[in-house]
Amino acid sequence: MITRTSRYLQSQLDARTSDVDVGDELAQANPVAVDAEKIMSRVRGALFDSFETLSSEENEQLCAWLRDYPHACAHLLDDHISKLLVGRVPEMVRRILRFEPIATAGIPDTVVNVFLQEAVRSYLYGHFQAAVALARAAVEHALRATVPYAAVGNWTLDTLIEAAGRFKLLDAAELQLATEVQHAGNRVLHRQACDETVAFDTLVKSRGVLEVLWGNRQG
């Protein structure tokens, strides 16, 4: 049986840093080493969090001291991010396999594909709010690129969706999908976090809208 790459990499990381469950016998034989690794794991996490989120004053004092040693800081961050990303691979694979590939007669404009790709990547990494917001942006830019006269007007997404119906680019069911993507994006951007289910559902709807828009577009 072939070992998956992520499992192999995880085993190598575990062997290098002793993050694997060492068991009572080994822990008793070398408790200082086990405790030291636990402490370093917390330090690496605190350092990474200080760049990524708002942190406490105590945490910031520690990280400010660490940042006085840039080479050591880079080593700690490299270690933490490597473990973080490798550990997420199985979940990312599970998530991406939920989608079906979409092929269209024409390839979307670069900005639309960028927003779509970043929306899917955000979902894979577990950044569900970002995924929904970017899915909304992908639909808006797709409509702006395909609805006649939209490029010369400062139309809102409501107007773009309405115009897509008037110009028969989307049918009633597809217009509903676009509207639901818009509302999901609005909720995330203004007041309400979402979970994986909502993010996946929004991405499926946005991909469906884009497939129709570019399936009807020649070249």
Image: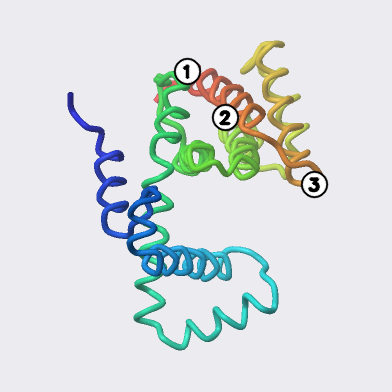
Q: Residue at x 59, y 39 (%)?
A: 131
Q: Is residue 80 left or right of residue 49?
A: left
Q: What SS does tag 3 mark?
A: helix
Q: Nearer the viewer, residue 134 or 34?
A: 34
Q: Residues within 10 Å of mark 2 (few under 14, many from 20)?
A: some
Above or below, 130 against 51 in this view is: above
Q: Quadrant of the N terminus?
A: top left
Give the amino acid at mark 3: His
Q: Residues within 10 Å of mark 1 (few under 14, many from 20)?
A: some
Q: What is the CA distance from the residue labelled 2 to the residue labelled 1? A: 11 Å
Above or below, 150 against 211 in this view is: below
Give the amino acid at mark 2: Thr
Q: What is the CA distance from the residue labelled 3 to the residue labelled 1? A: 32 Å
Q: Which residue is mark 3?
A: 190
Residue sitting at the far right: 191
Q: In which quadrant of the rendered view does residue 129 lie?
A: top right
Coordinates of residue 210 in the picture (x, y in percent): 54, 25
Asked if the residues shown at circle 2 and circle 1 are in contact, with their CB atoms under 8 angstroms apart, the answer is no
Q: Residue at x 35, y 72 (%)?
A: 75
- Given this view, does label 3 or label 1 mark the residue nearer the observer? 3
Above or below, 167 against 30 in this view is: above
Q: Which residue is mark 1?
A: 215
Give the amino acid at mark 1: Gly
Q: What SS does tag 2 mark?
A: helix
